[in-house]
Amino acid sequence: MKALVQLLGLFVAMGASLASAETVRLLPDRVFDGQNMHEDWAVRVEGDVIVAVGPAAEVSGNGARDIDLAGQTLMPGLIEGHSHILLHPYDEVSWNDQVLKESIAERSVRGAQHLRAQLHSGFTTLRDLGAEGAGYADIGLKQALEKGVIEGPRLIVAGPAMVATGSYGPKGFADHVTVPLGAEEADGDSVVQVARKHIGRGADFIKVYADYRWGPDGTASATFSVAEMSDIRTVAELSGRYMVAHASSAGAMQNAISAGVRSIEHGDGGTPEIFAAMAADGIYWCPTLAAGEAISTYRGWQKGKDPEPLRIKEKKRAFITALEAGVPMCMGGDVGVYDHGDGVWEMELMVEYGMEPLQVLRSATSVNAQMMGLQDKIGSLAPGKVADMIAVDGNPAVDISTLRHIKFILQGGHRVLQ
Ligand SMILES: [Zn+2]
């Protein structure tokens, strides 16, 4: 009996999770369904599935418990397009020291804490862009999530990113000193084997570095050839997966486009021609604005006081150019470079750099779901979709920062936050 009482206490402490068969009708002021904002709509959920979405008067309350979300906007759970769950902000510990001095155990424990922070800030799905020297710990974290050992968003993982020999860091050691890298090297024929190994270990997609800062003057220059990346893409596609590329320079972005990537990460040097080609091929762009601002701040930049660093000016130019070209815009900030739990920062910057808040909401929900090939499950509120949703005070299509005031989170029908 005592054990039963303790168990009930634990259940209560965990919050009022919806029983698997429970039916609820959610009654907010408005609903963002992944595309548009609708006043006075309601959503009916049965267990972990959405069964009805529409004008409140037309959504049946029969047999359902009503949940009053007055004053709030209900929308799909946020989807982060570019995270690093195994990294923490570089002003706490530099990237080199995280890779070289933190144990995989420490990094995994931190990763579990980061996942919890992400979920509690409204992110119900993350696409994670590489374990950065922590082996396959991202895949281990995903498995722990799926077993219910830890709490966090749905995780879509890359495993170790693939880099061309000699290009990646940590760097600067004497010839006789070998250090572990933040990614896995491969070249020529071995790219096929490494891509297959990652898939076999559980990677959901393959990430390659199409360039890195290894030009003669330290600027970003291309690494893999188009032929090498095409081989990787073929391996990924044969297995039902896709390839994405880190690329900052125009040349590497062009190589990535030629090789058939799903998305390009960073893209600072994109030209009107490059972005036009991406729009024509339906290639997504994750601009990682927040990482650019975070790194500039770590280097001493005081926003609003000091002149804008070149990399910020360049990113703003690229962002406007891509918007004008009609590139499908991912919401992906490179979170991990800055605080997990501060994922909304990227959305605020997308607005600040020139995007309409409603477009940003689409990027963080339906567009990112499409990019990941998960549009049938998540990213929109429609019958048959998984009940991943959040409610925020006010209207985020008017003020994107209202996403910092989350009042309600449902993940697969399980209530995370009251
Ligand atoms: Zn990244």
Image: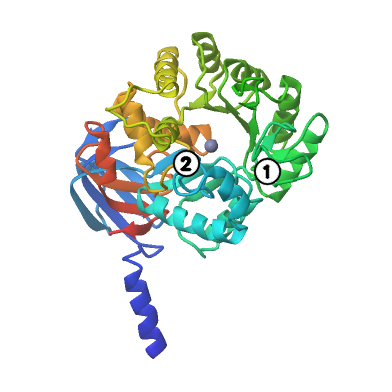
Pointers 1 and 2 in contact (C-beta within 8 Å): no
Q: Is residue 417 left or right of residue 162?
A: left
Q: Is residue 319 above or below residue 49?
A: above
Disc 2 is placed on an element classified as: loop
Instruction: Tell me the residue at 51%/32% (across/down).
Output: 371
Determine if the C-beta at disc 2 is less than 8 A from ligand 1.
yes
Q: Is residue 16 above or below residue 232?
A: below
Q: CA distance from mark 1 to mark 2?
A: 18 Å
Colour scheme in use: rainbow
Res. 337 mark: 2
Task: Give residue 202's position: percent from left, percent from top.
Answer: 66, 49
Amino acid at circle 1: Leu
Q: Is residue 103 left or right of residue 180?
A: left
Q: Which residue is mark 1?
A: 181
Query: Could you tell me which quadrant the C terminus lies in?
Result: bottom left
Residue 329 visible, this orientation = yes
Instruction: Tell me the residue at 37%/75% (across/down).
Output: 10
Q: Is residue 319 above or below residue 158?
A: above
Residue nearest the observer in this picture, 303 or 174: 174
User: Around disc 1, counting alpha carbons within 10 Å, would you say few (fewer than 14), some (14 to 19), or many (20 or more)?
Assistant: many
Disc 1 is placed on an element classified as: loop
Mark 1 and mark 2 lie on one chain; the one further toward the N terminus is 1
Q: Quadrant of residue 310?
A: top left
Task: Give residue 27's position: percent from left, percent from top.
Answer: 22, 48
Task: Give residue 5's position: percent from left, percent from top.
Answer: 35, 84
The single residue placed furthest to the left in the displayed view is: 71
Task: Give residue 395's position: percent from left, percent from top.
Answer: 22, 37
